[in-house]
Amino acid sequence: MSLYLKNAKYLDWQTFEITAGHLLVEEGNSGKVTSVNQIPEQSELAAEDRVIDCQNRLVTKSFGCGHHHIYSTLARGMPAPKKIPTNFQEILTYIWWTVDKCLDLEMVEASALASALYCAKNGVTFVIDHHASPYAIEGSLATIAKAFDKVGLSHLLCYELSDRDGQAIADAGLAEHESYLSGGGQGHVGLHASFTVGDELLTRAVELATKYNTGLHVHVAEDKSDQDACLKDYGKRVVQRYADAGALALPQTMLVHCIHLDESEKELIRTHGSWVTENIESNQNNNVGQANYGQITDKVMLGTDGMHSDMLRSAKAAFLSGQPLEGVGMDTIYDRFRNVHRYIQQNGFKGDGDNNLVILDYDAPTEVTSANFIGHFIYGLDSRHVNTVIANGRVIVENGLVTNVDEEEILAHASEMGNKLWKKMGES
């Protein structure tokens, strides 16, 4: 199949060069986008070929999410916890560890479909997810993958390994990674924060990641309590512990949050060239603090931590909060917004080629140029401007409507599963 974009105003996501004309978008994991002088006549097109008239709208590379928790989708609007949390540990105990323990595979599937739907409509075509459902582990990663494939998104998945629920559940998490990765699934080996992961589990996780040529995806010093527990239990700080275990030697390893680090830990991250993911809105929501990421590394990408599926929103939040602490410029935040693509490419993951595009119906009051696009990105563009989304050369959202799934059916089922989850939580 060939997809032609007629009358496109193509914006190169790296140089901001804007070129008006027609585009040919190839299908597949590594499909290219090339400029063409003219669109073939209708009689010259194959039956499966398509032509979309962009009507001089902006066309650019679609977006990626550097850290998501799709399992949190059904938590939106849920009843208050049995105890109102007063610190981060209680947020985990009374909210998120209550949610994840009550999930079954049907709920996981509903969460994944709804999250994929929201991502697609927000222009996100690649999602790096970190999943937890300790009493529904077996088949969970394949369930999420199938849901994302159905909507048309590419993905990089893992399960959140932890010792907090006992040896049998930790073993089941390792087995789920083994099953998913050995079957060709694209993923990491996931870990919860250091304070819930013992040395044996950490060693086994690094060994498994090494076996499948991938890295760890782990929460790091999101709250000061993570550092306090690591110093108490292991006599070292969190990043040092992961470095000693060999996790930082894996180039695919992702260190998420990284708020409460000292200078020695920052130096370890820079020395190993490790990637860090910022989730500013979640950090603000949990009142855990904020990091000066510019003092850690320039290999920072953005995620949502499951708060939502809108990466344009995440970029604006990172810019506004980063100004007083880091003195960040618009260019720095745009780089963080786009670094997910560099991470994917550098580590050989598939599904984020040039043929992942978004057509933006951006009603700008002023001219958009190569010189001023960054200002439009920060102060103008938002998810309501996402008109059409192309993933791996195929249209998955057109004129704001998803094309591969029934949106009403997905959301109705998610609502049903949400009520089921809330009832189960109330009985637990």
Image (cartoon, rainbow, N blue to C red):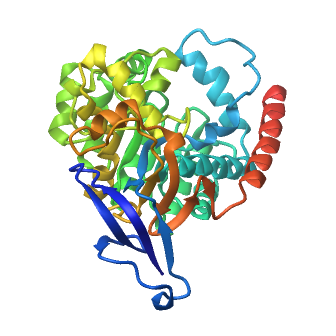
Q: Residue at x 48, y 87 (%)?
A: 45
Q: Position of residue 48 (x, y in %)?
A: 54, 83
* Image quarter in which the C terminus is found: top right
Q: Nearer the viewer, residue 178 or 146?
A: 146
Query: Is residue 22 at all visible to an observer of this figure?
Result: yes
Query: Is residue 184 at all visible to an observer of this figure?
Result: no
- Is 316 on the left or on the right of 415, as rendered? left
Does 298 sit above or below residue 354?
above
The residue at the far bottom in this view is 43
Q: Residue at x 28, y 37 (%)?
A: 374
Q: Residue at x 21, y 36 (%)?
A: 298
Q: Residue at x 34, y 78 (%)?
A: 38
Does 31 sit above or below residue 427?
below
The image quarter in which residue 261 lies = top left
Tell me how many marks there are.
0
- Is 388 on the left or on the right of 205, as rendered? right
Does 413 sit above or below residue 310?
below
Q: Position of residue 91 (x, y in %)?
A: 59, 19
